[in-house]
Amino acid sequence: MNSIIRKILPITVIIIIWLSLTLTETIRPIFVPGPQHLWKALVGLKGILPRATFISLSMTLAGFGIGISAGVGLAFIMAYSKVFLDLLGPAFEFSRPIPIFALIPLFILWFGIGRLPQVLFIGLGVAGIMGVNTQEAIKNMPSIYLKASYNLGANKKRVYRTIILPYIFPHLIGTIRFAAAASWGLEVAAEFMGSQAGLGFNMIVQQVYLNTSGIIILVIIYCAMAIIFDMIIGKIEVRLTRWTERHISESI
């Protein structure tokens, strides 16, 4: 019971402060709207929310899937083949520190305005996160596992399939969850690239009309989807990595 109280106490305090400031009109609604303003904004947006939510969700999932596949695949290829490491490594290291949001004008110039460049933009950001962390996870693997496998007669393909992949997978779960959270922020930025639909586009519209309540409603929807997405990944993690030491220690 004490643990539950500690968890809900900060949220309760924030809600009380919010209601105190808004219901007494201590702060103007344009800065911090009250519950009545949020409800009015939700009613005004309910006609466009289903389609906008579906568009943003589909873009995020598509970009996230592309980024996971490209980032992890590229890291494995460079770790597996010295030739590919020499060919792709310098370009990967050069592009890694580049701020992804600085590439928005180039994406518009190269790919134009549409759904495809927006999905590719999300995928590129996720691929950068996954590629770096996958590469580091492979590098930090204890060499004794590899030496023991080769001494027992395993070839390179078998070592990667039975040793390296199972070892790094639990280490990548945290990165996958971080990339999932980042993909929603990338989706908002992607919709700033001339989108005509989606939650991000409607957020721009609300900003133009200084409708703070509408912006907050859209932010809440983004947060809800991100939390649900993270919870799903967490459930999958528990099922796939139940054998790891972390889950064993948690169950003791």
Image: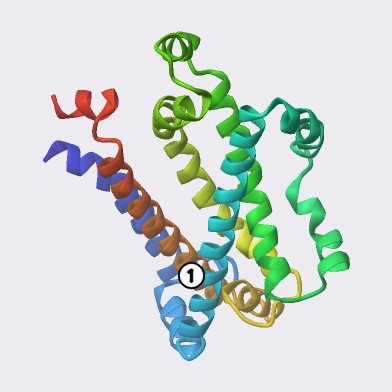
- Residue 29 visible? The answer is no
**Residue 44 in the figure: left or right of residue 232:** right
* Residue of label 1: 25
- Quadrant of the image occupied by residue 90: top right
Identify whether 116 is placed above or below 90.
below
- Residue 34 visible? The answer is yes
Q: Position of residue 1 (x, y in %)?
A: 11, 41
Q: Position of residue 205 (x, y in %)?
A: 67, 80
Q: Position of residue 140 (x, y in %)?
A: 53, 18
Total count of labels: 1
**Residue 194 in the figure: left or right of residue 249:** right
Residue beneath the point at 53% across and 74% down: 213
Question: In this view, which residue lies farthest toward the front?
Answer: 153
Residue beneath the point at 39% across and 31% down: 166
Identify whether 66 is placed above or below 25.
above
Identify whether 25 is placed above or below 36.
above
- The residue nearer to you, when weighing 245 against 199, is 245
Residue beneath the point at 81% across and 62% down: 107
Could you say whether the residue bearing mark 1 is in a helix, strand or loop? loop
Identify whether 107 is placed above or below 176.
below
Residue beneath the point at 41% across and 80% down: 39
Q: Position of residue 136 (x, y in %)?
A: 58, 25
Q: Amino acid at mark 1?
A: Glu
Question: In this view, which residue lies farthest toward the bottom?
Answer: 47
Q: Quadrant of the C terminus?
A: top left
**Residue 79 in the figure: left or right of residue 57:** right
- The residue nearer to you, when weighing 120 against 75, is 75
